[in-house]
Amino acid sequence: MQAVSKVYRTELVETHALRGLDLHVREGEFVAVTGPSGSGKTTFLNIAGLLETFTSGTYRLDGEDVSGLSDDARSRLRNRKIGFIFQSFNLIPDLNLFDNVDVPLRYRGMGSAERRQRIEGALTRVGLGSRMKHFPAELSGGQQQRAAIARALAGSPRLLLADEPTGNLDSQMARGVMEMLEEINAEGTTIVMVTHDPELAARAQRNVHIVDGVATDLAAAHGLVRERAVANG
């Protein structure tokens, strides 16, 4: 993203959610995004996931400028290249795990044989191969989040967006989910994770802090502080 701004307007109020935000995520990176409530993190993630448009600036996803895409084109691109993991899992309660993972694949027009292979592979990978016919209510919170990860992985996304993926989990389950994300990243998937947990953020390769709609690369900021300290030493 380059100089991306997002302004919400009503008849009485104009709210600047993002203010010229600059952020480049390299292929294969694991980036943690932190910041206080209302800082613009959710807006940033929605724009990154092609769920919202932006007011000005440039956003290139996998080299493609998405600024002028129609809603249909954005939906197709999102379905092909982006996977989502949400804090509240967002599993469909009336569908078993197999069918939950199948939902985004059906929108791609895949044949049933390929879909089955992808679904079974994804659920097995997250340790739920024996629970494909179980419903969300029959699973623990950690298992539901693993099912949500399987749903995201089944489409082989280039970019995985995780919004507080451990927010509804206890510490042990959170560690398990984080380890799984690290494994996925080690295999080459780019991950951008929003989190309020500093311990989880510290495990990412890079930390970006958003305040008042502006992003700061913490590693770069710390490096600049060190350089100044040495220069003034």
Image: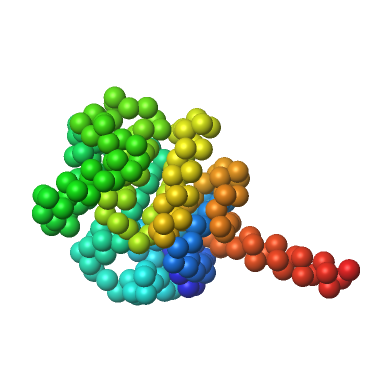
What residue is rendered at 32% in x and 27% in y? 139
Q: Position of residue 173 (x, y in %)?
A: 47, 33
Quick check: 126 left or right of 154?
Answer: right
Q: Position of residue 205 (x, y in %)?
A: 56, 57
Describe the colour scheme in one phrase: rainbow
What residue is rendered at 57% in x and 59% in y? 206
**In the depicted structure, whether residue 106 falls above or below residue 136:** below
Q: Position of residue 233 (x, y in %)?
A: 89, 68
What residue is rendered at 14% in x and 56% in y? 110
Is residue 56 in view from this perspective? no
Quadrant of the rendered image containing residue 223: bottom right
Q: Residue furthest top?
A: 138
In the picture, the quarter occupied by the N terminus is bottom left
The residue closer to the viewer here, 187 or 216, is 187
The residue closer to the viewer here, 35 or 131, is 131
Quadrant of the rendered image containing residue 207: bottom right
**In the depicted structure, whether residue 227 falls above or below residue 123:** below
What residue is rendered at 56% in x and 63% in y? 214
Is residue 81 in view from this perspective? yes
Quick check: 200 left or right of 188?
Answer: right
